[in-house]
Amino acid sequence: MITHPPITSIEELPLWSRQLEEIACTPLEYCADLPRIAERFEGWWHQERLDRPIFIAASVNPASGRRVNRRLDLLHDPDAWFDAKLADLQAIHRVGDTLPSIRADFGPVLLGGLLGGTLEFGSDTGWTHAFIDDAWSNAPDWLLREDNEWWQLLRKISARVAQEAPGRFLCCTPDLGGSGDVLLNLRGSSELCLDVMMQPETLRGAVDAIYPAWHRAFTELYRIALGRGAGLVHWLGLWSNRPYAIPACDFNYMIGPDAFNALFLPDIARQAATAGHAIFHLDGPGAARHIDALLDVPDLHIQFTPGAGSPSIFPWIEMFQKVQARGRSLLAITRPEEVLDLCEALRPEGLGILLDAAPPPAELDALFAALRKRYGC
């Protein structure tokens, strides 16, 4: 098993679990079936099948007349942002276990901006400008400061959503990003690859210094939502009656197993242990080489994205079977035409399917009906 550095415990975890269990028992305005969906997710986390695998898919209802995107260009006007996000939620056609939520979305790896990086946005994209020099002489102090504009805006927008959410929809968190991806954004890809070889101790120190900032942001998002009686999911849209984290390290596709295991895997295990419940975002073929090490982290479940352009999921069936054999739950992102064949190849217990790009509503309904028929639902 992978060992991790000491964690900072979150005292509210038992309280949050009780609150989440209560929320899971109550239908929502935009999801009357929440109790049944929550029950299905609880089975999925424990590799138990309630009736069928988890199925997450949604498409825009053409009758809405809306083009739905992330609305990043409206972030500095929280009222306009919220109104647009609520209208987007109402325009979405959801099937299966897709939960209605409004996400405080700041693009990928928000933690870099919370720690001093410069963020830039379009309407549907965001990025962080790298600035750390080769000597790391201008590296930030890794403190999450009260006067950071993104920290202030994150809490303001999260509170706005949480205030409106109880009994109606769920809050969804931004992508905070793991320590490796924070460093990737603030240092640059080729520069960070050189650092892995030339100054690994500098990286190890930065990873350890980032953990308190991640811990504070993660904890605050739960406090904001549950303190106002709102349910909380993270960006994959998975319900859990217990708090959970989604550790990630997209940078791992650029480095070998030895470097990943020494520099970044212990922090992934630390995040998982802190939350007590976790699913790792494994992004693409280059990242798949690290699956054995990830499965050595206790109670770490796996979400896999096959790569850009929605390539076939089927070259990874043996890896999925390995995940299932280790008693871990799996969320596979796949194309609509591969859903039913994937169900034939894998056990339904602990299997989750998320459509990368859903077809129009009528076709999506037909696909979901075929999936339900496959399992006699």
Image (spheres, grey):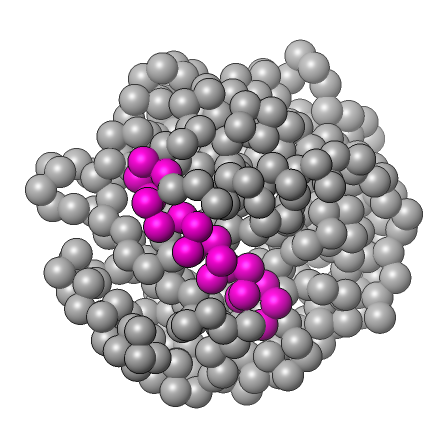
Q: Is residue 102 visible?
A: no
Q: Is residue 334 magenta?
A: no
Q: Quadrant of the N terminus?
A: bottom right
Q: Please tell me whether residue 17 is drawn above or below residue 276 in the rendered image.
A: above
Residue 329, percent across and down?
58, 69
Could you tell me residue 202's position as x and y percent? 86, 45
The C terminus - image quarter: bottom left
Left or right of residue 73: residue 88: left
In this view of the protein, which residue sits in the foreground, 225 or 273? 225
Residue in view at x 55 percent, y 40 percent: 22
Tell whether 374 sits left or right of 131.
left
Q: Residue sitting at 26 percent across and 78 percent down?
A: 373
Residue 224 in the image: above or below residue 198:
above
The location of residue 149, given as percent across then percent down, is 58, 16
Question: Looking at the image, which residue is at 31% across and 39% down?
Answer: 30
Q: Position of residue 288 (x, y in %)?
A: 60, 72
For the stretch drawn in magenta, the main secondary structure is helix
Seen from the viewer's position, the closer of residues 286 and 49 is: 49
Q: Is residue 231 above or below residue 93?
A: above
In this rendering, position of residue 302 left or right of residue 259: left
Magenta range: 28-47
Q: Is residue 69 left or right of residue 350?
A: left
Front position in the image: 132 or 116: 116
